[in-house]
Image (cartoon, rainbow, N blue to C red):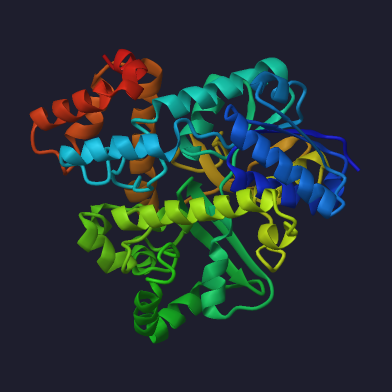
Amino acid sequence: MTNRKIALIGAGSIAWGATLIRDLSDTQDLKGSTVVLMDVNQERLSLMYRLAKRYVQEVKSDIRVEHTSDRREAIRDADFVINTAMHGGHQYYEKMRSISEEYGYYRGINSVEWNMVSDYHTIWGYHQFKLALEIARDVEDWAPNAWLLQVANPVFELTTLIGRETKAKVIGLCSEAYSYKSVAKMLGLEGEVQAKMIGVNHDAWLVEFKHGGEDAYPLLDDWISKNYQRHVESYFQRSREEPLNVYLSPVAFDMYRNYGLFPVGDVVRSGTWKYHWDFGTKRRWYGEYGGFDSELGWMEYLRRHEEVTNLLVRAVDSQSPLSPLLRGGGGGEKDVVVPVIDSIANDKGEVHTVNVLNLGALQGVGDDVAVEIPAKVDAKGVHRGSYSLPKRVLNLAIRPRVQRMEVALEAFLEGGRQPLFDWLISDPRTDSVRQVEGVIDALLSIPENSELAKHFR
């Protein structure tokens, strides 16, 4: 039994909060812990609190649940602080994207090489960066011994920012660490599969893939030689029913051919403009909806997200049991967050894929850059190993992504118009300085961006 205080910042995200409560309730060694739900949206916070209370009673969990709209009160003396907060919500970002497209920047000015993820906002993420930094500084002041688990995107930029600018013990976490299992399932591998994913968040690669202790990459190569064409035909047939399942799309295999390692998770949603020039290009690579990050695919993602949220909201006031909804009918696999908490709180020394400042772990990447690596996690923290990537992956995928992160952090920390200009002037969609200046002026002129206009003047 532990008696840990776990603060969830951004608890109004009901679907995510429900997952956390489910996983904590299922973790025997975290029984007795207190979860403090915090959000500035009182209505959503109240809904999440009622859902959590109902669920823990239903499954007879020993987890205690509290709620508050006071962020510092939630963080005070916490052992773990989980940040899932997203400033402004999707509506704000969609407005920014729409303005960008009026000036010829398809899918927004954030959509650039190796950064094609629709909710991964960097150069215009000023408010999100500011919020995450404020939360980290609250942790410094009110819970200096706590672990800050950064879950809200952009995980790469925010983990790097917090690691550089504060003393908070930050770990970035992302569920894409499990995506290698789809490759194992495709190959029909049963039993123990070992995998190591290395890179930076949303740009990590399968550097080790073993089955029964033997290298499984030859099995993958053999499968591709025999089954790839049938797989592609089947993939496109399923793409209407499964438009967001892009992890074994033709993009994944094309990246494998080009870079020599299989891409993990959301890497397949980024890459270069080869996959993203327009909706037609996206459809040829990702299927009917054009993948997650097309105009059609992203709206479908938001629709499904809202559908799940509404289902949970309706369930709060019903008499129906919550367990079938939260467990998806089959128990489900824990998200990455609670296992990491368990490993630290109970000094288990388990290996997890985490995002932490490099500090010499990954060759060819700066020490103060957050890298995504497998590491032993225990009560003392994260124990890094020593890792390397092939030159082609490092030079053509990782370093371009790191460079974009650095520009985004410069824009946030130093302000001024120049970082925005630098971000856009080398963009292949840019055909004139006038276009660059026009889109910057338009984005900074909307009422929601009055603070940005001062910051970037």
Residue 368 seen in the figure: no
Q: Is residue 235 left or right of residue 431?
A: right
Residue 35 seen in the figure: yes
As drawn, 222 above or below 287: below
Q: Is residue 367 left or right of residue 143?
A: left
As drawn, 185 above or below 105: below
The N terminus appears in which quarter of the rendering?
Answer: top right
State the residue in front, 28 or 183: 28
Q: Is residue 228 left or right of residue 327?
A: left
The quarter of the displayed image where residue 100 is located: top left
Residue 186 location (% of width, % of height): 51, 76
The C terminus appears in which quarter of the rendering?
Answer: top left
Seen at 37% across and 53% down, the residue is 299
State the residue in front, 98 or 321: 321
The quarter of the displayed image where residue 247 is located: bottom left
Residue 307 location (% of width, % of height): 51, 55
**Residue ranking furthest to the right:** 1
As drawn, 191 above or below 75: below
Residue 363 location (% of width, % of height): 48, 43
Residue 27 location (% of width, % of height): 81, 51
Seen at 33% across and 64% down, the residue is 289
Seen at 55% across and 55% down, the residue is 308
State the residue in front, 387 or 61: 61
The quarter of the displayed image where residue 311 is located: bottom right
Seen at 69% across and 49% down, the residue is 316
Tell me how many marks there are: 0
